[in-house]
Amino acid sequence: MRTLLATGTLALAAVFIAAPAGAQQLVGAGSEIAFTSKQMGVPVDGKFRKFDAKVAFDPKKPEAAAIAFTVDLASASLGSAETEAEIVKPDWFDTKKFPQATFKSTAAKATGPGRYEVAGTLTIKGTAQNVVVPVTLAQSGANTTATGSFVLKRLAFRIGDGDWKDTSMVADDVQVRFKLALTGVGPI
């Protein structure tokens, strides 16, 4: 169940990491990938402790963006050692076979002042899905913060196989939230 949360977080992370040798740097101390799933109707929160992003993004030319994200699935933190031991197993993340979730952008566009949509391919457990992630940029001095959220369908990525496919136990929807602190982003 918490595995679902971890899956959502992974997906989010995967959605916003960039691969090109870009000018931007991810500031780990100010960044977070979190998720919320529901187990028997009760929200369960989690986050990923290890992720990386490579971002080449010019707010004035979003169509030229190159964003790649990698999330270490075994780094899911759900506040319970028992749950964290379960989510690495084959029914959930299967981290021995699929240690990372990835995201690679395919397009980006402005949707308003400081607001963008980033489309790309999110891959979790060997399953690739096209996703569109809304992103809001805010700047303070030399730092830029990219925030956003989206809903991930865990079953589309085979997260929660076997008995865990029952959505009355663990909901299919996983809310993924991210805050990425970046340096080197041009003015919005």
Image: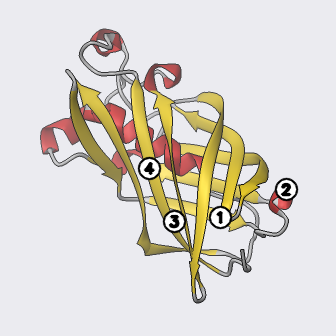
The numbered mark, 2 or 4, whose residue comes first in the sequence reads 2
Residue under numbered circle 3: 180
10 Å neighbourhood of mark 1: few (<14), some, or many (≥20)? many
Kind of residue sitting beneath label 3:
Leu
Residue under numbered circle 4: 177
Residue under numbered circle 1: 54
Residue 103 shown left or right of residue 181 in the figure: right
Kind of residue sitting beneath label 2:
Glu
At horizontal 72% and vertical 57% (from top left) the residue drawn is 112
Query: Percent from the top left, x then y, of residue 99?
Result: 46, 42
Query: Percent from the top left, x then y, of residue 147?
Result: 52, 59
Question: Looking at the image, do the residues carrying marks 3 and 2 touch, with CB atoms under 8 Å apart?
Answer: no
| Circle 2: element type | helix
Mark 1 vs mark 2: give the one in front. Answer: 2
At horizontal 61% and vertical 38% (from top left) the residue drawn is 122
Query: Does residue 111 appear in the picture of this structure?
Result: yes
10 Å neighbourhood of mark 3: few (<14), some, or many (≥20)? many
Query: Percent from the top left, x then y, of residue 128?
Result: 64, 30
10 Å neighbourhood of mark 4: few (<14), some, or many (≥20)? many
Mark 3 vs mark 1: give the one in front. Answer: 3
Residue under numbered circle 2: 63
What is the CA distance from the residue labelled 1 to the residue labelled 2?
16 Å
What is the CA distance from the residue labelled 3 to the residue labelled 2?
20 Å
The numbered mark, 3 or 2, whose residue comes first in the sequence reads 2
10 Å neighbourhood of mark 2: few (<14), some, or many (≥20)? some
Kind of residue sitting beneath label 1:
Lys
Query: Percent from the top left, x then y, of residue 173?
Result: 41, 27
